[in-house]
Image (cartoon, grey):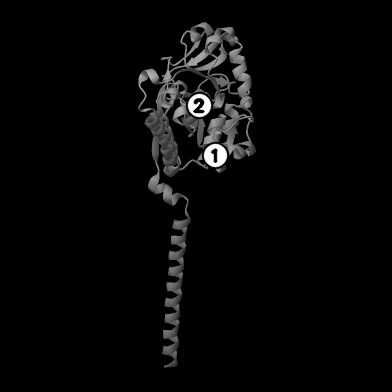
Amino acid sequence: MKTNQIAMLAAVAVIIVAVCIGLYVMSDKNTDNLNSSNAGDSDYYPVTVTTSIGGVIYEQTFTKEPERIVSMWATNLELLHYFGLEDKIVGAYAVENYVALNADLQDKYDAFDKMPMDRRSIEVVRSLDPDIIIGWSSSFNDGAGSLGSVESWNNYGINCFATNRPSASVEDYILLLENIGIIFNMQDVSDQKIAELNAKLENVKEKTSKLNESEKMTALVIEAGSADGGAGNFVYGSEFLTGDLVKQAGGINLFNGSMEALTAEKIASYNPDIVFIMAGDGLNPYEIDESIEMFKSDPAFASMTDNVVAFRFNELYMGGILSDTIIDRMFEAMYPELV
């Protein structure tokens, strides 16, 4: 009798231990699933986006969220800060004396450990083992200071993405924002940025809706003394995003081309109501007042110096998809009475 009781108690104990082990294993597996960084990825990735580089459309497929980013140019570093991706940046080629287009990000940009633009190289980037390189179209060619072709990086298993000038269309820049949201599974952030841009455009459209064509301000966008060793001036037309910003701000860009070097005399012949000029270039920013004085000192521009507004180079040219920050300022400069 006692022997049977002992046997029964032993059997119950075995069952209890087995159940506890089973519950522990199930609990452990569930915890792994909840904490796994790949759990969400498996439902979302892979995703494919397109990017325009050197006039060629490339498809780039991401099988997981990029964890190691190399960034080229200051505006892309700012853009990554805007999306809160700075912890994923393993290398950023950018200048130190950059004025952020989003003032709230200036301190973060200044504090970030940047790599000198004049020391960029394929070997250094490869040593950083990135899974994505975010640059300009010019970052991905065989020219001096560039990083080589998209194909070469794709062969290493590294994706490429360019954030500048797929065309003159603001809609294309909205697509760029959407693509960044898709790549990093952050559509909430890209949607917010797109909503802010659309709100600016709608505000301008509403306030200028009662103006006829003859009442709209005419303008030119000029990078003064920038071509042919200073003998010419780049003018940005309505077929280039920098020049298209005039239209988005409610004005008329008198130059219908893309980007072209023109003489000062040719520029003056357009006789615009207002001139927007760039202060400096990508690596050598000028002070705003200094740039205006330099422009006005050219006798050829004497007939068009009454209404000159200067923006930093990074705002008008380098800004790319962040250029919407100056639409309001252009609008205010052209139509102060409508503000």
**Residue located 63% across and 36% down the image:** 110
Q: Quadrant of residue 168?
A: top left
**Residue located 43% across and 61% down the image:** 30
**Residue located 57% across and 37% down the image:** 103
Q: Tag 2 or tag 1, which sits nearer the N-term?
A: 1
Q: Is residue 66 above or below residue 267?
A: below
Q: Quadrant of residue 11?
A: bottom left
Spot occupied by residue 214 in the image (x, y as percentages of width and height): 38, 17
Tell me which amino acid carries mark 2: Trp
Spot occupied by residue 184 in the image (x, y as percentages of width and height): 46, 41
Image side of residue 200 versus residue 311, left or right: left
Near-viewer residue (27 or 47): 47
Label 2: how many residues lie within 10 Å, few (<14), some (14-19) or many (20+)?
many
Image side of residue 250 versus residue 268, left or right: left
Q: Is residue 159 above or below residue 23?
A: above
Tell me which amino acid carries mark 1: His
Disc 2 element? loop
Image side of residue 102 versus residue 115, left or right: left
Question: Are circles 1 and 2 on residues that touch, CB within 8 Å?
Answer: no
- Which residue matches tag 2? 136
Disc 1 element? helix
- The mark closer to the camera, 1 or 2, is 1
Label 1: how many residues lie within 10 Å, few (<14), some (14-19) or many (20+)?
some
Spot occupied by residue 162 in the image (x, y as percentages of width and height): 47, 29
Near-viewer residue (309 or 25): 309
Spot occupied by residue 327 in the image (x, y as percentages of width and height): 47, 29
Distance from label 1 to label 2 (Cα)? Answer: 17 Å
Q: Quadrant of the N terminus?
A: bottom left
Near-viewer residue (267 or 217): 217
- Which residue matches tag 1? 81
Q: Is residue 12 visible?
A: yes
Please identify the residue farthest to the front as the structure is shown.
Answer: 337
